[in-house]
Structure formats: C-alpha cells, structure tokens
Amino acid sequence: MKSKTINRIKDMTKPYFKSIIAISLLSLLVSIGEIAKPYIIEIVIDNYLSKGIYQVEAMTIGILGAIYISIVIIRKYYKFYSNNSNKYSWRKCCI
C-alpha cells in the first residue's frame, strides 16, 4: 500500500481506536471462552457427575458453573457492543 493510503486509514480510524481495541480484546476472550465451554462441560460430566462427587480438591461444580456463566455473559456483552458500537459507548452498555 502507499503511505498516503495508510495515513488516510489511520486518520479515519483514530476516533474509533478505543472501540477497535475493546472489540478486539473481547473477540479474543469470546473465542477462548467458546473453546473452553465444551471442555468445562466435559470435566463436569466425566470427573464429577459420572462419579457422583461434587468436589475434587479445590475445584467444585459451583466454580466450574461460575466460569461457564461468566463466559456466556462476556459473549452477551461482546455481541451487544459490537452490534451497537456506533450508538452506545462501553460505559452505557455494561454499567
């Protein structure tokens, strides 16, 4: 690309820099979370429910459930923020 084009792109994206960073970080978190959800379910079924126990060392079903729910909530806010990034700021969305 020409340096003129790159400079124009920088100028156009400058007002949206915080939004671009927030969406990038949230998309990374959501991707990792989407990969982790089936693994969390596998751990709960194989290590806890099939054996009839609810605690193995420090990890309990409650902690794994809280991790799973937090992944789902982060995904919800990511979808809301990425769909409405022009209408709302991050503060209005999540607080």
Image (cartoon, rainbow, N blue to C red):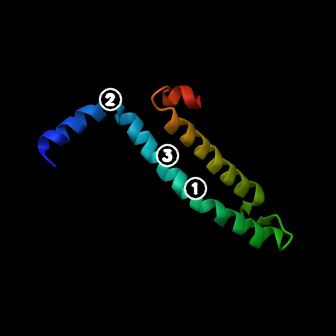
Q: Residue at x 62, y 50 (%)?
A: 71
Q: State which quadrant residue 21 falls in.
A: top left
Q: Residue at x 58, y 32 (%)?
A: 94
Secondary structure at numbered mark 1: helix
On-image quarter of the C terminus: top right
Type of amino acid under label 3 = Leu
Q: Residue at x 48, y 49 (%)?
A: 27
Q: State which quadrant residue 3 falls in.
A: top left
- Number of marks: 3
Eye-nearest disc, 2 or 1: 2
- The residue that disc 2 covers is 15
The first of marks 2 and 1 along the sequence is: 2
Q: Are marks 3 and 1 in contact (CB under 8 Å)?
A: no
From the viewer's perspective, is residue 43 above or below residue 90?
below
Residue neighbourhood size for the residue with mark 2, other residues' Cα within 10 Å, grouped as few (<14), some (14–19), many (≥20): few
> How far is disc 2 from disc 1 in space, using C-alphas?
29 Å
Q: Decide which of 65, 75 is in the foreground and name it.
A: 75
Type of amino acid under label 2 = Pro
Type of amino acid under label 1 = Gly
